[in-house]
Image: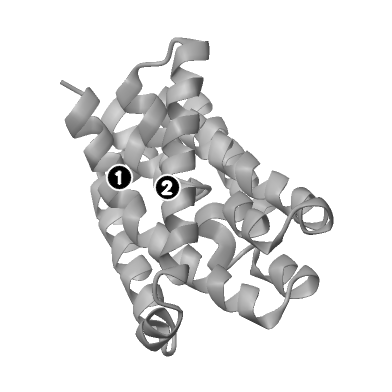
Amino acid sequence: MAILALLALLLGAFCGHFWQENAIVDAFLASDGLFLNLLMVSVGIGIGQQSGIWQKIRQYHVKALVIPLGVILGSLAGGLAACWITGYPLAEGTAIASCMGWYSLGGVTIGALSGEAYGSVAFLSNLLRELLSFFSIPLLIKFLNPAACIAAAGATSEDTTLPMMMKYTDEESVVLSVLNGAICSAFVPVLINACYSIWGA
């Protein structure tokens, strides 16, 4: 999936460079808001289809919320640190970090708000987070704990990195991983808008 996403990005860059006046490319660019809304609908459907998610949240109580809260705060803190190091504007830097590994939504949303350059950074940095989590989960479970594996995966812990969680952790951690991914995914659009509202002025 990550390779397909990277190929799609390269294909888009190729089309944009060689066919700048092409009617199909123009139609895609003019419809980016529609694609974003369709993506958000699919996210809502995916969260709604999680069987028994509300029962699981009630079962784990605060424990189900501690890890997502840590992932959100840690991601935002990392975004602030990256802004300080790179000189990126706070709105864009924290918004990119608040995607928590969800590269498809981050690239489209931030690209629409701040331009293609920032959208590309959002896409690639969050894709890299997902790829790194694949390699780091075996090490994190060996030297730390399952919560660290879930935190590294971020919003992807309910889908693309879930097989790694199933392989290297226990059943309870897998349930918490799904809950974390669902909660973080629900907060990504909220956090992106909040970052632009707070620091975008």
Which of the two residues, 23 or 4, is positioned nearer the viewer here? 4
Residue type (three-letter) at the residue carrying disc 1: Leu
Relative to residue 178, is residue 154 depicted above or below?
A: above
Q: Nearer the viewer, residue 94 or 140?
A: 140
Up-down relation of residue 15 to residue 133 (above or below) = above
Q: Residue at x 58, y 40 (%)?
A: 11
Q: Position of residue 85 (x, y in %)?
A: 52, 12
Residue hosting label 2: 72
Name which of mark 2 and mark 1 comes first in the sequence: 2
Residue 195 is situated, as x and y percent measured from the top left of the image, at 27, 34
Residue 36 location in percent, x, y?
30, 52
Residue at (51, 24) in percent of width and height: 17
> Mark 2 or mark 1, which is nearer to you?
2
Disc 1 element? helix
- The answer to whether residue 19 is seen in the rendering is no
The N terminus lies in quadrant: bottom right
Which label was assigned to residue 191?
1
Figure label count: 2
